[in-house]
Amino acid sequence: MYVLGLQGSPRAKGNTNFLLDGMLHYLKEKGADTEKIQARRLRVEPCIGCGYCEEKGICVFADDDMAARIYTMLRRADAVILAGPVYFYNFPAHIKAVIDRTQALWSRKYRLDLEDPGRPWRKGLLLSVGATRGKNLFDGMKLTARYFFDAVGADYADSIVYHRIEAPGDLTHHPGVAEDIQSCAANLDSLLGRKKILFACRENACRSQMAAGFARYLAGGRIDALSAGSTPAPAVNPVMQEAMAEKGLDMAHLSPRSIDDVLSGIRPDMIVTMGCGEQCPYIAGVSYADWDLPDPAGQSMDVMRQVRDEIEHRVRQLMDNQDGSGSPLKENS
Ligand SMILES: Cc1cc2nc3c(=O)[nH]c(=O)nc-3n(C[C@H](O)[C@H](O)[C@H](O)COP(=O)(O)O)c2cc1C
């Protein structure tokens, strides 16, 4: 399970950071692969409301950290933790710029009708602190978080918020923080226990991406579907993206990863190879399957569609078998 923590306070070592670190540390101990981003250190152009993403499905700003890595991380995440202090009843400017830029993902979903394969199971958690004691202090944070999680394809599962936290260090003396983290993190328990299947091909640009995309969409709540390549390409194949878009699945903002990189963080229960041959590592105790599929890279759209449909068929069968009951595949709620 990959957990992305977005630290939205300009104070790198303030209360929000303390709370987020506590949550990420706890999840890491439970086996999650965690990553923290300090929003203040990012180079993010603020959204200008130009409408480009509603038409094209991507943001007009192509050269900042959002384009380079944040969209990809959001798409990869099983859980997104949005953390920020209250600044004038909303998030501070750096993280608010990130939030606003996820409008491009909102556009893909609501204007272009594309379904993010991770959507059925990705979860969102909100962490926040504020100095005052008013009962409406976190209303703005919660509303913003709700809209943000919807845009990034996550279910807003829970939040931890603390009033009367002002100076750096205030939260370290607050009672009950460890217990609150534990109970909030329990929302992710079902994701932590999933069986891990790694789909591997040569470039991680077409076949293994499609297989993981279908597996995520169909059974991501009970299968942690990963993909990788023995020689990863610089980017995923645009024809593959188009072919998956025909099925309603949004494969944008994914990046090819190397098999070594993926295996450095997890030990899969199963590896499905589809063309990386002897370059796929053997791991004792892991079950293997080899799907003999042609490489559609550089071929026509028709070939890509044929390979896509064959992969969908095999993934459905595999998910049925993983289900153990032989029952038809259920889509995740
Ligand atoms: C510019 C600014 C605006 C703030 N606005 C509010 C506010 O509207 N309500 C509130 O209760 N606290 C407000 N605060 C206080 C912070 O929420 C509080 O100090 C918090 O603990 C900071 O968290 P951090 O240590 O993670 O940065 C504001 C602080 C700053 C610097």
Image (cartoon, rainbow, N blue to C red):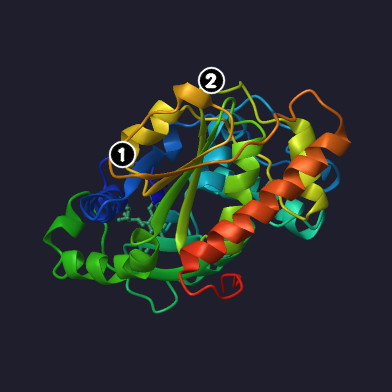
- Residue 43 vs residue 91, the one in the foreground: 43
- Residue 191 vs residue 163, the one in the foreground: 191
The answer to whether 162 appears left or right of 100 in the picture is: left
Q: Quadrant of the C terminus?
A: bottom right
Q: Label 2: state its secondary structure.
A: loop
Rendered view: 53 above or below 216? above
| Residue 159, image x, y percentages | 39, 68
| Residue 114, image x, y percentages | 75, 55
For label 2, the residue is: 231
Name the mark on residue 12: 1
* x 31%, y 50%: residue: 32
Disc number lying in front (2 or 1): 2
* x 65%, y 44%: residue: 210
Residue 128 position by quadrant: bottom left
| First in sequence: mark 2 vs mark 1 | 1
| Residue 125, image x, y percentages | 42, 62
Residue 132 position by quadrant: bottom left
